[in-house]
């Protein structure tokens, strides 16, 4: 496997890290990060509900943005509406989310976090939020933007290659 192409591949840049050194470091780091994220324990209040990390993104959107339609959730999660509808149905049966009629359009379903589980979902997200805050707080706003844009570019490129 060669990682030698593009600017910065031959010599260190002004911060002392070549592109190849950065690629190598990230290839070794990413599996550890993903593994740690997957091992984030589900809060006791939600443990018996057999939730998985795949549910966390859906619940995070509802926590941060409030009630959303299934189509809006699907767009944010970059999943098919039928897949999200199935997830919502599963979570609704477990009492984690509530489904209601959209007062503006009774054909649409509005999904919200069940109030009884709001704190548990917040607790589940808190571990990652604290870690990201520790990592991002010392950076300037421009550096934070670079970190976020770098991760988004990585995600986009992996999806394109896959």
Image (cartoon, rainbow, N blue to C red):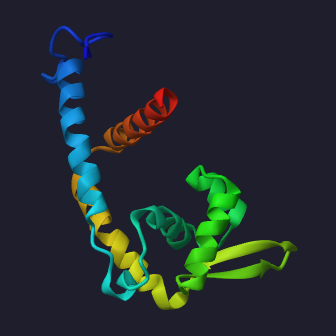
Report the side of 12 relative to 105 (left or right).
left
Q: Please tell me whether residue 83 is drawn above or below residue 10 in the rendered image.
A: below
How far from the left and from the top, in percent, is residue 93?
59, 84
Quarter of the image for the N terminus: give it. top left
Residue 136 seen in this snapshot:
no
Q: Residue at x 68, y 80 (%)?
A: 99
Q: Residue at x 25, y 44 (%)?
A: 31
Report the side of 67 relative to 100 (left or right).
left
Depth check, front residue: 150 or 30: 30
How far from the left and from the top, in percent, is residue 81?
69, 58
Q: Residue furthest left?
A: 16
Residue 117 seen in this snapshot:
yes
Depth check, front residue: 132 or 58: 58
How far from the left and from the top, in percent, is residue 89?
64, 75
Q: Please tell me whether residue 145 is drawn above or below residue 107 in the rendered image.
A: above
How far from the left and from the top, in percent, is residue 159?
49, 35
Q: Residue at x 69, y 59 (%)?
A: 82
Q: Please tell me whether residue 86 is drawn above or below residue 114 in the rendered image.
A: above
Q: Residue at x 18, y 36 (%)?
A: 28
């Amino acid at each position: 496997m060669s990682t030698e192409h593009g600017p910065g591949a031959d010599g260190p840049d002004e911060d002392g890290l070549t592109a190849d050194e950065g690629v190598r470091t990230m290839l070794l780091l990413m599996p550890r990060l993903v593994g740690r994220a997957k091992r984030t324990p589900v809060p006791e209040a939600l443990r018996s509900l057999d939730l998985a990390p795949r549910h966390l993104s859906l619940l995070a959107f509802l926590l941060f943005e409030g009630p959303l339609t299934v189509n809006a959730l699907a767009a944010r999660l970059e999943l098919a509406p039928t897949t999200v509808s199935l997830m919502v149905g599963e979570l609704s049966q477990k009492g984690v989310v509530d489904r209601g009629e959209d007062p503006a359009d009774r054909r649409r379903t509005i999904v919200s976090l069940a109030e009884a589980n709001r704190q548990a979902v917040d607790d589940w997200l808190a571990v990652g939020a604290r870690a990201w805050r520790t990592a991002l707080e010392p950076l300037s706003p421009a550096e934070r933007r670079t970190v976020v844009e770098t991760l988004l570019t990585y995600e986009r490129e992996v999806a394109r290659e896959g």
